[in-house]
Image (tube, rainbow, N blue to C red):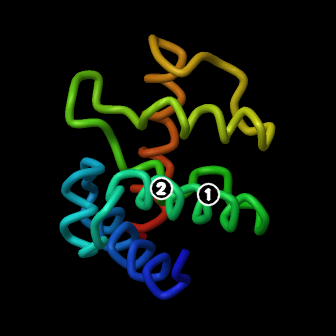
């Protein structure tokens, strides 16, 4: 994956964090102009790399947490939670109250960090 595209995504996500907003996978793919084919698959791989980068430098609430499903509840897809479990950051399920509460805490932490 392109590190240039990854940095572009990070820039968009940090701007969203400063604005106190989340974004859907599809909206971010369009905003970042991720090329076809497999747009969402490419986006997911790039977001995974961002989470791994953040984790490597001790950031638990990655800016990738701002990317959510368009459907309710507006939380990341299962791959997000699976990766966080792999990294030892989260130990709950991919959906339901535990996932929603954990995600909400990550988003609030990001908003607090970037609005300073």
Name the spot of residue 39 as percent of width and height, x first: 32, 59
Please give left or right for residue 70 compared with residue 16 in the image.
left
Residue 90 quadrant: top right
Q: How many marks?
A: 2
Task: Say which residue appears at 43% left-offset and 45% top-offset.
Answer: 107
Q: Are marks 1 and 2 in contact (CB under 8 Å)?
A: yes
Q: Quadrant of the N terminus?
A: bottom right
Q: Residue furthest top?
A: 96
Q: Classify 45 as above or below 53.
A: above
Task: Say which residue appears at 28% left-offset and 56% top-offset.
Answer: 20
Name the spot of residue 54 as percent of width and height, x first: 66, 64
Please give left or right for residue 31 compared with residue 116 in the image.
left
Name the spot of residue 91 as percent of width and height, x first: 72, 23
Q: Residues within 10 Å of mark 1 (few under 14, many from 20)?
A: many
Q: Quadrant of the C terminus?
A: bottom left
Q: Which mark is residue 109?
A: none
Task: Say which residue appears at 40% left-offset and 73% top-offset.
Answer: 9
Looking at the image, tell me whether mark 1 or mark 2 is earlier in sequence order: 1
Task: Say which residue appears at 39% left-offset and 81% top-offset.
Answer: 8
Q: Which residue is the site of mark 1?
A: 51
Q: Secondary structure at mark 1?
A: helix
Q: Classify 77 as above or below 61.
A: above
Q: Which residue is the site of mark 2?
A: 64
Q: Secondary structure at mark 2?
A: helix
Which of these two is toward me, 100 or 20?
100
Residue 33 quadrant: bottom left
Measure how far apart labels 1 and 2 are at the Cα level: 6 Å
Name the spot of residue 14 as percent of width and height, x first: 40, 71
């Amino acid at each position: 994956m392109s590190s240039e595209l990854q940095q572009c995504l990070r820039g968009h996500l940090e701007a969203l964090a400063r604005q106190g907003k989340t974004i859907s996978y599809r909206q971010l793919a369009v905003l970042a102009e991720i090329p076809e084919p497999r747009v969402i698959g490419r986006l997911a791989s790039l977001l995974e790399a961002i989470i791994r980068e953040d984790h490597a430098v001790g950031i638990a609430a990655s800016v990738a947490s701002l990317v959510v499903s368009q459907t309710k509840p507006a939380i990341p897809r299962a791959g997000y939670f699976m990766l966080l479990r792999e990294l030892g950051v989260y130990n709950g399920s991919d959906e339901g109250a535990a996932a929603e509460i954990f995600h909400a805490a990550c988003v609030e932490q990001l908003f607090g960090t970037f609005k300073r």
